[in-house]
Amino acid sequence: MGIEAQDQEYPKRLQGYDHQHRHSHNLKHKLNPILLVIVTNLVTIFIVTGPFSSLYQSTTTKNPPNDSFNSILQELNTTKSQLAASHSLLSDLHHRLNSTNLLVQALLIDLTTRQQQEKQYSGLKLGSSNNDDGESSSNEELNLAIGPYKLPFGYSPRIGSDEIHSPVGAACLRFQDELNQYMSYDIGGECLVDEVFAEMLLLKGCEPLPKRRCHPMSPKGYVEPNQDLQDSLWEIPPDNNIVWDPYSCKSHKCLIERKNNKGYCKDCFDLQGKEKGRWIFDDGGLNFGMDQVLRTKESSGRIRIGLDIGGGTGTFAARMKERNVTIITSTLDLDGPFSNFISSRGLIPIHLSISQKLPFFDNTLDIVHSMEFIGNWIPETMLEFLLYDVYRVLRPGGVFWLEHFFCFESQVNGTYVPMFDRVGFIKLKWHAGRKLDHGGVQKNEWYFSALLEKPVT
């Protein structure tokens, strides 16, 4: 009897041990109660639909469903709802995690950029004890010019900082030796006659250059400009009003006589020659008449202010001035006193290269014009950025008047028409024709002229 009792007791102990072992195992891994419910329901489903389903069905036939079975079904439905809610929560967390990852990546990129800029700026810091006094002073002057400067009243919410920097183009940081040379002068004295050197830096992308604490050379025997605006628009200024040192020509007579040479704007100083007849007549082709263009825009607003890109000596602005339209002319003084010549005519020059962002706010100009300056010599991507910038500064309904854009015949429809379409201009006028001057026929070069409108949304 004792042995039989022990034999009967052993399975019970084993079963109890197994139960305790499973219970401790569950506690060890701290299973979520919801998982236990899921497992229970899965077992129930397995019993109902699996190999024991016939047994279950026969049992239920004898014993109809009771409250316990209904409770299990209710619990199963509750578990299903909880699973759906959990899935929605996990999906939301997944989206938040992706957003956080993107934010972290952006912060890392910004941090890397700032570190690179700090390294570049550190190359401009004084710290050059091995240099002679002259170079050290130029380094110090450069550092003072670009700042930063602490704001007198501390942190400004508008700026988001307690200091302000003078703008110097990022490309300038690659030309420290040239910058030091540009900033080498006697403080309060006369600047070096280094206009050609400054133009070189601008064309390298070092724009804008830092400010300087020196006086530019003034022309000797300066004569006051003509007070009669109509006369000043078409007269040659006195030679005494120009500092001729940076240029190959040393007089206006020399500038006028070089019209027979090849190159950009060689004849534009001759105001009584070809310049006098520009934009007077519309030939139905590449040459648009100014009055016809202005009449085209009368229905969508009057043209009052604008910009002429690469405007030479300012004749487009002069013609517009005669029609009470104010035009700013952008130019570089490439071997000629273009800026001084424009201002002597009573017009407004702006010293600006093709690569710089146009210094106007969005939706502000009525017209932007360019003639024989924009063409396929500009890299395609750079040109597209320029076109988008022109689009940006034009007001809705404003026009881009582009004259004599030069390129190869295959580029007209293959490259530039799709580019202008991408930017989003509306074509009011568009004419293309073979370029007949300077070997254009042999090279299969073409011009096209266009009057393009920024759409009104």
Image (cartoon, grey):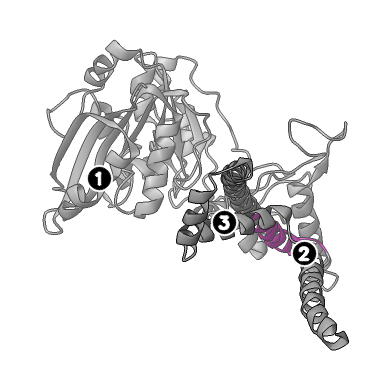
Whole-Å distance between the Cαs marked 3 and 1? 67 Å
Q: Position of residue 102 (x, y in %)?
A: 60, 53
**56 left or right of 125?**
left
Residue 7 point in image, percent of width and height: 80, 84
Q: SS class of the residue under badge 3?
A: helix
Q: How many neighbours does mark 1 have within 10 angstroms: few (below 14), some (14-19), or many (20 or more)?
A: few
- Callout 1 amino acid: Pro
Does residue 153 appear anywhere in the picture?
yes
- Which residue is at a point 43% across and 48% down the rendered structure image? 249
Measured in 3D between alpha carbons, the distance from the residue under mark 2 to the one under mark 3, in whole angstroms, is 88 Å
From the image, tell me which residue sits under label 3. 44
Discs 2/3, front: 3
- 214 vs 151: above or below: below
Mostly what secondary structure, the magenta segment?
helix
Q: Is residue 110 located in the magenta-colored stretch of the structure?
A: yes
**Residues at circles 2 and 3 in contact by the CB criterion of under 8 Å:** no
Q: Considering depth in this image, is 44 or 159 the residue closer to the camera?
A: 44
- Which residue is labeled 1 in the image? 418
